[in-house]
Image (cartoon, grey):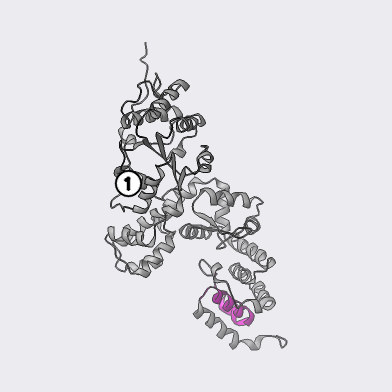
Amino acid sequence: MPTAVGPPPLLASRLSPAALPEPVLVRPRLLGRLDEGVAGPVTLVSAPAGWGKTTLLASWARVARAEPPPAWVAVETGDTGERLWSYLAAALRAAAEGMPDDGPQPPVPDTPPRPDQLELLAAALAARERPVLLVLDDLHRITDPAALTGLEFLLRHAEQRLRLVVGARTELPLALHRWRLAGELTEIGPDELAFTEDEVADLLVAHGVRLPVAAVSRLRERTGGWPAGLRFAALALRTQPDPARWVERFSGDQPDVAGYLREEVLGALDPDARELLRRSAVAAAVCADLADAVTGRTDSAQVLTALARDSGFVRHDDSSPPWYRCHPLLADLLRDELGRLPADELPDLHRRAAGWYAGNGRPAEALRHALAAGEWDGASELLIAHWPELAPYDREMAAGPPPAAPPVEAVRRDPELALACAAERAYAGDVGAAAGYLRVAVGHARALPAPR
């Protein structure tokens, strides 16, 4: 007769705070936010990969001034709701003496808790003198609605004796609006998790790296304060003979950073969203209409809205309609991938962008993309039609590498094309290149027809 195989044993490593990277930077401002958060029922730390959620939660769990210490459950990919409850039962029993033996742990391990067991657990929690703090790391990996409904039940009926701290990459299907509306939900997202300049400097010192203030500021700007990007940079800087110069060259297409972004950020997106980001990266920023024009799709508004809400690597401004911009390192990587498109595809994307900008009263951007598309005649025509508008540029939009320079003979043969190139380079702030093109234009001005 075959022997019944029971559920796998619970792993102690999943019931203890995660190991911390060395060296780890203590971040008092965020530890303080968590201390404030657990005065209420729910604290949500939500951000994509690499924003330091687990490191923050593990740091806090080790130093939290709480009795009993916070309970910890690390959720893993593939966990069922039943498996989650097995770990929850073990964590809560370890953290809170006097919990009922017939609490949420079902009679047969890895089966769902019965409603009466949930009620027993809620009652036992409510009867405690002090609340139990429970950290659930990577809760987004649970897709079983019943498991999350059970958590909500405990929070509602434990009468403030259960304080839940959640780490997740995405918005959770929990009824968080209930606590948000009551002012009882603490939320920590990418904006708060991003390193400040002072924290960047402290992280570098912890890695044995000292940079001039200007280089620290530049590194903070290039990474957007993204913790994983900063750690990659700090590790690399330890072996650089000229750290400040290395910071100037630091970009998202460097192997370690690119690999992480591809696997953890782009790999988490559906193929449609990934392709929209890649193709719209021809522009430094896009609105939905421009993204539609460049990609040929009609749903860019919905996709960009979702990316800005969930990805942490796409931000939008407050204009109407909003303009969206990728994180600097992700933008570097996407532009690098654009360069690997078939030879005719990238010029076509620039051509579409130029057409949209020209049709929407933005000749400076149209000029840049016309040159990038190799549309020399189109660039000259833009200059002729809009030259009074091509002096006071908004340099905010001139991002990314310059468009490929036209052939020297084409520039000498067409002084208006030389002027167009001068205008584009001035727009990008490249004064030296702009002056060079102006000299060519002046030197060959006689080639223009008399009316010019």
Between residue 16 and residue 418, name the one nearer to us.
16
User: Split into 4 quadrants, where in the image is the N terminus?
Assistant: top left
Q: Residue placed farthest to the right in the image?
A: 451
The kind of residue on which mark 1 rests is Ser
Residue located 42% across and 30% down the image:
84
Is residue 133 at least partly visible in the picture? Answer: yes
Between residue 6 and residue 42, name the one nearer to us.
42
Most frequent secondary structure within the magenta stretch: helix
**How many residues crowd mark 1 within 10 Å: few (<14), some (14–19), many (20+)?**
many
Q: Which residues are magenta?
A: 403-429
On the image, numbered disc 1 is attached to which residue?
A: 59
Look at the numbered disc 1 and give the secondary structure of its residue: helix
Between residue 243 and residue 61, name the one nearer to us.
61
Q: Residue placed farthest to the left in the image?
A: 208
Asked whether residue 415 is drawn in magenta, I would say: yes
Asked whether residue 452 is drawn in magenta, I would say: no
> Is 368 situated left or right of 180 in this image?
right
Residue located 45% across and 52% down the image:
190
